């Protein structure tokens, strides 16, 4: 049974129809998470991406989602007023509620991206209140890239909502890009006390060379392009993902199925196989056998793929080279 057919089977389950997956994307930038396109048709989407329009939210007709809510305000963990200072930076992707920490950024080539061009007041909305307002009391997949406040947004949700979330994605910093920002270490410390495991940690970063030295050394656009591909980067931030362990004895078949589905979409078939096996042991539903069968076939395809053979070939080649020296 192929993945499309399995997803169709999942979407027609009564527990999925009556309680559709809720997918939250903070910092959506008007574009759906590509991974969600396979499950959007039977899911509820909440997308937060601020602009200057004055309304609480739109319940938007969308051909991809079963239902999509778009919030055109800055989302915060707690709000004492209806507006907050917002720092507009040279690069719009670095604009934030937090003030950029320019002295700490000076050693890096992209420091000027964080230069503040204007400080304005923007309408804000409190995450927990918004979710309550539209009548949702659970989140299944929580994804945020909120320029320094990822953790405080997630931790503002009720403990029950946090603990029941199945998939989490954060993009916290490793260097002091913003004043008082949530860092990778803060996320790890917070999640240590929760029943989740770290699924992935993809470290990204800039060049630790000042912009003036970079521009002086690489004067032409062509040389700059070569430098950006040739120089080594240092750790600056990380894309992190967590999955729920599902250790709560009250976990339902729906949660095991969604955990299987989410890990499958991440191509972690060894993990999805474990969820399917545990689900069958707990609930005895045949669908879990179908899910496990799919996962093991996917594992074999993954292990014996051309990509894997290429990696093995490169390892062997490197060993031969080291012996030749």
Image (cartoon, rainbow, N blue to C red):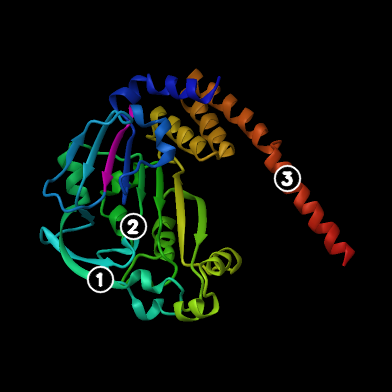
Residue pointed to by mark 2: 150
Query: Which of label 3 and label 2 is nearer to you?
Result: 3
In the displayed structure, 222 sits above or below 19; it is below
Name, please, the residue furthest toward the right.
324
**Marks 3 & 2, CB-CB < 8 Å contact:** no
Q: Quadrant of residue 16?
A: top left
| 162 vs 61, nearest the viewer | 61
> Looking at the image, is mark 3 or mark 2 earlier in the sequence?
2
Which x, y percent locates residue 116?
A: 27, 72
Residue pointed to by mark 1: 117
> Looking at the image, is mark 1 or mark 3 earlier in the sequence?
1
Q: Which mark is residue 310?
A: 3
Which stretch is magenta? 42-48
Q: Is label 3 in a helix, a strand or a loop?
A: helix
Q: Is 284 left or right of 79, judged from the image as shown?
A: right
Local crowd size for mark 3, using a 10 Å CA cut-off: few (<14), some (14–19), many (≥20): few
């Amino acid at each position: 049974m192929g993945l499309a057919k399995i997803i169709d089977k999942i979407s027609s389950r009564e527990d999925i129809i009556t309680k559709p997956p809720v997918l939250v994307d903070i910092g959506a930038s008007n574009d759906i998470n590509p991974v969600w396109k396979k499950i959007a048709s039977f899911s509820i989407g909440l997308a937060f991406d601020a602009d200057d329009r004055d309304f609480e939210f739109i319940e938007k007709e969308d051909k991809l989602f079963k239902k999509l809510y778009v919030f055109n305000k800055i989302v915060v963990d707690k709000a004492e007023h209806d507006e907050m200072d917002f720092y507009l930076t040279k690069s719009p992707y670095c604009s934030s509620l937090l003030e950029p920490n320019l002295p700490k950024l000076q050693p890096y080539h992209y420091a000027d991206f964080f230069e503040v061009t204007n400080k304005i007041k923007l309408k804000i909305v409190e995450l927990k209140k918004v979710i309550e307002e539209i009548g949702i009391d659970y989140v299944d997949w929580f994804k945020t890239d909120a320029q320094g406040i990822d953790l405080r947004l997630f931790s503002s949700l009720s403990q029950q909502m946090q603990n029941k979330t199945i998939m989490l994605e954060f993009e916290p910093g490793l260097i002091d890009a913003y004043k008082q920002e949530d860092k990778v270490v803060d996320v790890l410390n917070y999640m240590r006390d929760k029943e989740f495991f770290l699924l992935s940690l993809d470290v990204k970063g800039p060049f630790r060379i000042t912009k003036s030295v970079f521009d002086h050394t690489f004067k032409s656009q062509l040389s700059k392009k070569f430098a950006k591909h040739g120089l080594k980067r240092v750790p600056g931030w990380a894309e992190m993902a967590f999955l729920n362990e599902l250790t709560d004895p009250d976990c339902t078949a729906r949660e095991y199925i969604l955990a299987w589905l989410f890990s499958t979409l991440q191509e972690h078939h060894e993990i999805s196989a474990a969820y399917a096996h545990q689900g069958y042991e707990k609930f005895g539903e045949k669908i879990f056998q179908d899910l496990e069968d799919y996962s093991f076939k996917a594992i074999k395809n993954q292990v014996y793929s051309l990509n894997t053979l290429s990696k093995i070939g490169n390892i062997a080649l490197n060993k031969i080279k080291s012996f030749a020296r």
